[in-house]
Image: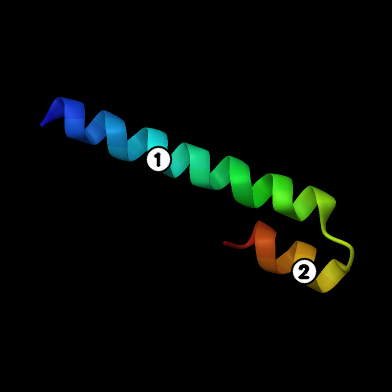
Amino acid sequence: MGMMDEVKTKKKLKAAETWFNMAETAKTQEKQVEYYTK
């Protein structure tokens, strides 16, 4: 199970990085808030 947990953790980290980058490049504050709170 350790390997599967590691894969899930990496996927969550990648998703968090993606949402953070989207928030950084968002044009409106509403979108920034939406992306940061995901």
Q: Tag 1: residue type?
A: Lys
Q: Which mark is residue 31?
A: 2
Question: What is the C-alpha distance between the residues marked 1 and 2?
Answer: 23 Å
Tell me, what colour scheme is on the image?
A: rainbow
Q: Is 14 left, or right, of 3 in this rendering?
A: right
Secondary structure under the numbered disc 1 in the rendered image: helix
Taking the spot 63% from the left edge, 52% from the top edge, the residue there is 19
- 38 to 21, vertically: above or below: below
Q: Quadrant of the C terminus?
A: bottom right
Q: Tag 2: residue type?
A: Lys
Q: Quadrant of the N terminus?
A: top left
Q: Residues within 10 Å of mark 1 (few under 14, many from 20)?
A: few
- 10 to 21, vertically: above or below: above
Secondary structure under the numbered disc 2 in the rendered image: helix
Tell me where residue 31 appears, x and y as whole percent. 77, 69
The residue at which mark 1 appears reads as 11
Q: Sequence-wise, which precedes: disc 1 or disc 2? A: 1
Q: Is 37 left, or right, of 33 in this rendering?
A: left
> Residue lying furthest left in this view?
1
- 20 to 33, vertically: above or below: above
Q: Is 19 left, or right, of 29 in this rendering?
A: left
Taking the spot 88% from the left edge, 68% from the top edge, the residue there is 28
